[in-house]
Amino acid sequence: MSVDLATRLIDVLGGLLLFSTLLILAAGQLFRAIYAVAVQSVFLAIAGAVLGAATGNPDLWIIAGITIVVKAILLPWLLIWVVRRIQIPREIEPVIPINATLGLAAGIVVLAFRLSASLGPVRQAITGNALPVGIALILLGVLVMASRRKALVQMVGLFASDNGIFFTGMAVSQGMPLIIEIGVILDVVLGALVMGILVLRVRSSVDTDIADLEDLRG
Amino acid sequence: MASSLLWLTPLLSFAIGLAMLLVRDRRVLATLDVAGSLVLLGLTLAITGRVEQGGPVSALGIFRADHVTVLFLVLIGLLAVAVSLVTVGWMRRELARGQMRAERLRYYYALVHGFLATMLVTVLADNLGILWIAMEGTTITSALLVGFHGDKHGLEAAWKYIIVTTIGISFGLFGTVLVYGAAAHAQGGVLAGAMNWSSIVAIAPRLDPGIIRIGFIFVMVGYGTKAGLAPVHMWLPDAHSQAPTPVSALLSGALIKCALFGIIRFHTIARAACGPAFSQGLLLTFGLVSVVVATPFILAQYDLKRLLGYSSVEHVGIIALGLGFGGRLGTYAALLHVINHGVTKALVFLVAGDAIGRYGTRDMRVIRGLLGIAPVAGTLLLMGVFSLAGTPPFSIFISELMIIRAGIAAGRYVILAVFLFAVVTIFAGFIHRVGQMVFGTADASVGREPEARLPVLGLLLLVAAMVLLGVYVPAGLDRVLAHATEIIVG
C-alpha cells in the first residue's frame, strides 16, 4: 500500500473515530453508548491494519487483532453483562444538556487541530492527522466522563479516550513496541475488571450507582 | 549479578504476594509480610551500594537504576518494613473489632505485596512504557486495597480513585507517546531502546521542542493526577483517608512519590529539549496551586486521616515548588523532601491509625488525651505533626528551608510570599488541632491496651530516620542526592 493512500485512509478513519465519540456524547441510552465505543474500536483496528500494510510492520497487525478481540468484543461484552446483572435504568441523565456538550466537543476538536498545526516538521513523524485526532479523542473522552453521572458511561468515556491514545500511538513512526502495547491493553482489561467489581459491590450493598455516591466531601 | 537484582527485586515481591494466596494461617502471613519486606529493603540497599560504587546499572534493556532511582527505591523498602511491623498490631485489633475477616486476610497481604512490586517497577523502569504500565498497575492493586473493607465510603473512595487516576494517567501515556514520537523522528527511525529514558535523554537536545512541550503538559497533568497535585487531586483525600491505615501510609508515603518520579524523568528530558524555563514554570504553577488549595481544607478539617491526606497535597506541592525553583539547590531540596515527607507522613498515618483504633473515631474533636493512654504513640504523633508543620529540629524543616533558599536564589519572591503565608497558616492550624488530641484526659471508654513491641519498633525506625535527617544529612545520602541532582539538572 502506498504511503499516500495510507495517509488518506488514516485521515478517513480518524474522522470516523471522532464521529463515534460524538455518538457516545449524544447517546441518550446506555446501550447506544456501549455499541458506539465497540464500533469505534473496530475502526481503530482497521487503522492498525492499514498502518501495518503501509509500514510492513507485522506487530501492527497483531495489535489490530488484539484490539478487535479486547476492545471491540470483550470490554463491551463486560459492560453489557454488568448492565444486565444490576438492572439499572438505561437512560443516561446528563449533568450538562446534550446540546451544550456537543458545542463543547466542537470547540475541543477545533482546538486540537490548531494546537497540532502549530508544530514544526516533527509532524511528519506521525501519519496524517493522527495527532490532532488523538488529542481530540482523549479530551472528548474526558468530556463524556465529566458530563455523565453514571459509572458505566464513565467507563465508556475512558475506553474512548484510550482509543485516542492507541490511534496516535500506532501512527507514530512504526507504532509503539509490541510488548508495551500488550502491557497497556492488559492494564486496561484489569482496570475494567476492578471497576466492574466495584460497581457490582456497591449495587449489591447500597443499591445505587457508584458514581452517585457523594458522602465524602470537604 | 548486580544487574539481575533490578528485575529480581520486584519479581520476588510479586512472588511473595502470590505465595501468600496459598496461606491461611494468620501468623504465617504476618511473618511472610515482615520477612518479605526485610528482604526487599536488603535488596534495595544492595542495588544502592552497587549504584554508589559503579554508577547506573541496566538490565534486560528495560530496567535501569541510577542515583535518582535508588532514592525512591530505598524509601519504598524502608516504608515496606515499617508498615509490615505496624501491620502486626493493627491487624490484631482489626480482627478483634470485626473490621477484617480472617478468611480474607491472605487477599489483603497478597495485594499489599503486589502493590509494592508495581511501585518497585515504576522506579526501576528505564523504558517509559513500562514505567506507565507499572504506574497503572499501582492504581489497580491499590484501588482494591482502598475499597478492601467493602463499606460504602471505602467503595466510593475506591471508585473515585480508580476512575480519576486511570483517566488522569492516560494523559501520561499520551505524553509518553508524543515524546517517543519526537525521539523516533530525531533518530530518523526506530532504533533499539527507542523508548528508554536513558537513550531519549541522551539525544534530548536534538528533540523538537514544540512536541516535547505538548508531551510534557500531558505528562504533567497525567502523572500529576496520580501524584495528587491540585487541581487534579480531588480523589486523594478520599482514597488516602478511607484506605486501611497501613495502605494509607504506603499511598501517601511512597506511591505519590513514584508518580513524582515519573514527572522528574520527563522533566529531565524537557529541560534538555526546550530549556529549563518551560517545565519549571509548569511545576511552579502546579506546586503553588496545590499548597494554596490544601490550606483552607487543612484548617477546616475534623477528620484526622483526611487532614493528613490534604497535608500530602500540600507537601507534593512543596516538592513541585522545589523542582520548579530549580538549580542545584532547589532540585536537591526537592529530592530530600521526597524522603523526608515519605518517612514522616507514613509515621503520622500509622500513629493516627493506632489512635483511631483506640478511640473508634477519626473525629479530632473526640480524640483526647492520647499521651495518657499510649505514651509512645502520643509522643510520636506530636513529633510527627511538628515535623509535618515544618518545625525545627525535624527533617521537613531542613528541606523546606532549602526550598525557600532556592526560591530566593531564583528570585521568585511573589511565589515565596504566598508559599510562606500558606505554610505558616497550616502550621498554626495543625498544632492547634493536635495539641487538643494529645493532651487532656481520655474518656473511660477508650481502648487502653498496652502498646505492642513490634509495631512500636516499626514506628521507631521511622522516627529515627526523621530525627536523624533533621540534624544532618549522612554523607552517603548526601552523595546520592548530589549525583541525583546532577542527573536531573545536568
Image: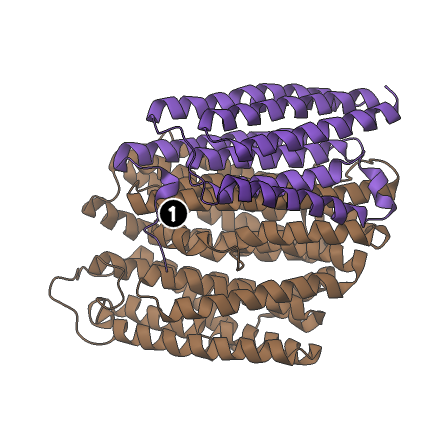
| Amino acid beneath label 1 | Ala
Instruction: Report the side of B277 relative to B344 (left or right).
Output: right
Q: Give the position of the N terminus of chain B as an image quadrant.
A: top right
Give SS at disc 1: helix
Q: Is residue A33 visible?
A: yes
Instruction: Report the side of A204 relative to B243 (left or right).
Output: left
**Pointer 1 residue:** B157
Residue A205, given in percent of the width and then of the height, sits at: 26, 35
Instruction: Report the side of B139 relative to B351 (left or right).
Output: right
Q: Residue at x 54, y 52 (%)?
A: B225
Chain B pictured colour:
brown
Q: Residue furthest left?
A: B444
Chain A pictured colour:
purple
Residue B390, given in percent of the width and then of the height, sits at: 47, 75
Q: Residue furthest front?
A: A99
Q: Residue at x 78, y 40 (%)?
A: B194
Residue A61, given in percent of the width and then of the height, sits at: 72, 20
Q: With respect to residue A34, does A206 lie above or below?
A: below
